[in-house]
Amino acid sequence: MTLRFIGTTSDDGDCPTLYDIPETGEILVQGDRETDPEHLAHLRDVKPSETFVRVPRALLTRYAPRTDPAPLQPFAQISHLFRDFRHTAFRLETRRGYASDRNSPKWQRWLNGEDIAAEPANPWRENVAAQTARGKRFERVRIVDTPPTPGQRFLLASAPSNVTAGEDIRNLSRADADRLRLPDDDFWLFDSKTLARFAFDEDDTTLGVYVTDDPAEVLAACQARDAAWHRATPTSDYAEQVRTSE
């Protein structure tokens, strides 16, 4: 089952921390084990398999979900959000590759050494151009490894078409992402109030999205967006860094 980092109040990254188990709707809590004999004596209905940990109240008030878990739904069901958002659509990409890229005809052309930087308009880029012409923003931060993986190099090679359409795409090293304690799951965040988290299988195939307006989850996504955006490098600058390092 998937274990998704939610948030921590520890600056050192050790504990305490909350994790989400999306498949079961359960929350896993990391903290110091309770050892006080008097406290343990007052605990009720304890099963042999149970243990107990201490966490600060701030961890729960900041990060604990306030609503029931969102159901997994097909990505196609949120297509309207990319037209209907009012101000900003932000994407965090954390994976080292995507099956949808590897299965596309453009992937083989890229492997053959073709220039895929200038692609003709497609429905995605047409919508980006239409929405940004209305003053809206499409923003994207891609977490990249050092050196970048083939999947990340492919996205870098194809990024100019999306940038020309109106997307602001930036890149952030995985080392920086780890230092910033960014989540390890992909998401879209619309207008800082609607969150769509991706679910993938072990082959990087999209299984669907969890859509929520839970205040705690949205706040955590906003914080991740702001931290990532502040440190990320624009696509053109990052592409130059990759070229000079080769």
Image (cartoon, helix red, strand yellow):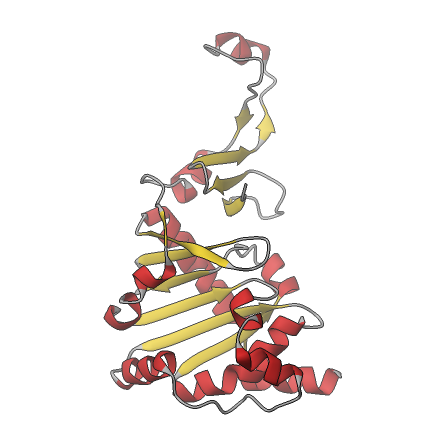
Residue 96 sits above or below residue 134 on the image: above
Residue 234 showing in the rendered view? no
Looking at the rendering, which quadrant does residue 190 occupy? Answer: bottom left
Tell me residue 144's x, y (percent): 62, 69
Quadrant placement of the C terminus: bottom right
- The number of discs equals 0
Point 34% across, 80% down: residue: 123
Q: Is residue 189 above or below residue 19?
A: below
Q: Answer with the quarter of the image where residue 137 lies.
A: bottom left
Is 230 located above or below residue 40 in the figure? below
> Which residue is pictured at 28% across the width and 80% down the height?
131
Instruction: Find residue 165 and report its horizontal and vertical position in percent.
Output: 39, 86
Q: Camera-side residue: 77 or 222?
A: 77
Return the residue nearer the eye: 140 or 121.
121
Q: 213 above or below 226?
A: above
Image quadrant in which the N terminus is located? top right
- Could you tell whether 173 is left or right of 119 in the image? right
Q: Quadrant of residue 90?
A: bottom left
Query: Can residue 109 be seen at all in this image of the molecule?
Result: yes
Taking the view exactly as shown, the residue that stands out farthest to the right is 246
Q: Residue at x 66, y 63 (%)?
A: 175
Q: Percent position (x, y) of residue 23?
A: 46, 40
Residue 230: where, in percent of width, then height? 50, 70
